[in-house]
Structures are given as C-alpha cells and as structure tokens.
Image (cartoon, grey):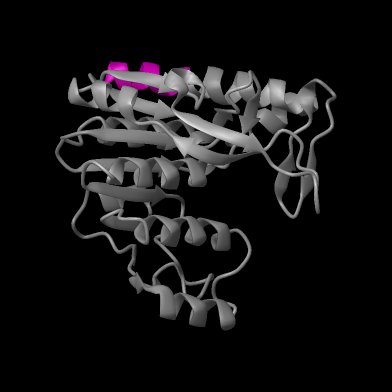
C-alpha cells in the first residue's frame, strides 16, 4: 500500500455545513489511500436537550449513561456518518461508514468506574486492520465515527482523537502512515489570542517545556498525548492544524516529532 493518510476532523467542522461541504470536497481529491475519522459536534447534546435527557460533563468530558449512549450512537454512527458518506459519494469518493463494531475493527473495554464513572466510555484495546486494508486496496475510503465495541455486544463512546491515533498505529505495522488532526486553529499556539503564533515543531522535550509554561493545557493535552503516542509507535508523520494544511503548501501548522 502507498502512504496512508489518516485524517481526523473535529466537531467545529461537523457543526458548520459550509465548512464540512468544503472540507469533504477537498478531501475527496486527495490521491492515494485515505481514512477519515470524525467527532460528534454539538448535535448529540442538542438532541438530548430536545428529549429532556440530562447531559452530564466532568471537566468537559461527557459522562455516557445508557440514554445518552443511545443518542450518541444514533447521531454519530447514523446521521453524521451517513451524511458524510453521502457528501463524499457526491464528490466521487467511494466511502463506507464504520464504527469499531463493523468488521470488528476496534475493540475497547468499558472504562473503570474509579476514580470517575464515565459510564459507557471505551478505552481501546485492539485494532484490526485486515478488513480496512481490503477496502483501501480497492480505492474505498473508510469513515469512522467515535463508537467502538467490547466484543460482548456492548457499544462504547470513544474519543475520536484516540481512534485516529490507534488506527494510525495499527496500520503503521504494514505501511507508511501519516496522521493529521484538523481543527479550527492554525496549530498549537504559543499565544492563544494570536492565531499566527504557531509552534511549528514540537518534540518530547519541548512539549514538556510548553506544559510547564502553561502554553499547552486543558483540551490540547489529550490531543497532543495522542499525537506523541502515535509518533512513538512508528507513525511516520503527525500534524495538527486547519484542514488547509492538507491541501496547500503555504499553510502554517504544527508537526510533532520524537
């Protein structure tokens, strides 16, 4: 297989119909094997509110009880995933939607209830790439939502950044793999109020310095932990920035290095 690009898009793109359509139009033009992972955006929370189902968060992370798991599955694996597939087909990119249960591609286990019970949240234990390799070899693009399973019939809500990282690591055993995290910023910013203050390269040593100086904190920490997890497990290239980094040579973004 040629170099595989694994691209994760965040909820900010999902929530904006114009941005999503523009991204998918450009994504469809990427040559060679590619795989897309998408987050859930705000739609699941909106639907839960409409149905008077409480949404609980702990430090910004969703606690997935049974009722919310039903909604997340309907929204992530259903409406959002199939909407993306339909738009890719309209752009002549043949794609198939996946959760971790499909093809037994991603097996997780329910996160322990201590110290915080996140409910039906899944921590990835195994990635199986065989089915995906068959599709990619036949020019079919897998599109993953943020749902996995435990091999015992239980679906689990799983962080989309982690799914992208673990898929990249799984494929890296057999081919050259590149991982791209696309979100609304130009990359990791030295000054959150200055969009142009992009830290172009971060390695393990400078990463710790940025944490110690409070430049990297909150939601960026788990994202960057996933980046370093990938780069230390044979993924050839890991980048963070706006989607334009995939399509334009003039774009500034952050590259993760060992």
- Residue 123 visible in the displayed image: yes
Q: Position of residue 76 (x, y in %)?
A: 56, 26
Location of the N terminus (image quadrant): top left
| Tally of marks | 0
In the rendered view, tell whether residue 235 sits above or below residue 71: below
Q: Nearer the viewer, residue 132 or 63?
A: 132
232, 160: nearer the viewer: 232
The location of residue 117, given as percent across then percent down, is: 80, 44
Residue 43 visible in the displayed image: no
Which residue range is magenta in the image? 82-91
With 57 as the anchor, is 209 left or right in this view?
A: left
- As for residue 84 lying within the magenta part, the answer is yes
The residue sitting at 26% across, 18% down in the picture is 94
Residue 32 in magenta?
Answer: no
Which residue is at a point 80% across and 50% down the rendered structure image?
A: 114
In the displayed structure, 197 sits above or below 103; it is below
Task: Kindly identify the residue that appears in the image at 50 percent across and 35 percent down.
Answer: 14
In the displayed structure, does residue 191 sit left or right of residue 52? left
């Amino acid at each position: 297989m040629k170099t595989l690009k694994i691209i994760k898009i965040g909820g900010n793109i999902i929530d904006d119909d114009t941005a999503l359509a523009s991204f998918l139009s450009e994504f469809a033009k990427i040559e060679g094997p590619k795989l897309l992972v998408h987050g859930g955006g705000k739609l699941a929370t909106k639907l839960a509110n409409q149905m008077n189902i409480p949404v609980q968060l702990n430090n910004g992370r969703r606690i997935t009880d049974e009722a919310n798991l039903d909604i997340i599955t309907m929204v992530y694996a259903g409406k959002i995933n199939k909407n993306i597939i339909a738009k890719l087909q309209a752009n002549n990119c043949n794609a198939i939607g996946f959760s971790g249960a499909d093809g037994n591609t991603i097996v997780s286990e329910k996160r322990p209830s201590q110290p915080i019970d996140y409910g039906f949240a899944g921590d990835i234990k195994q990635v199986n790439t065989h089915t995906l390799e068959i599709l990619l070899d036949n020019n079919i693009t897998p599109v993953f939502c943020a749902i996995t399973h435990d091999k015992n019939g239980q679906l689990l809500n799983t962080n989309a950044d982690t799914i992208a990282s673990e898929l990249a690591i799984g494929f890296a055993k057999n081919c050259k793999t590149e991982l791209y995290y696309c979100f609304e910023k130009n990359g990791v910013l030295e000054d959150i109020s200055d969009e142009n203050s992009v830290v172009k390269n971060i390695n393990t040593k400078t990463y710790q310095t940025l944490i110690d100086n409070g430049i990297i904190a909150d939601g960026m920490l788990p994202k960057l932990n996933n980046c370093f997890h990938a780069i230390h497990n044979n993924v050839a290239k890991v980048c963070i920035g706006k989607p334009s980094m995939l399509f334009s040579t003039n774009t500034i973004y952050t590259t993760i290095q060992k």
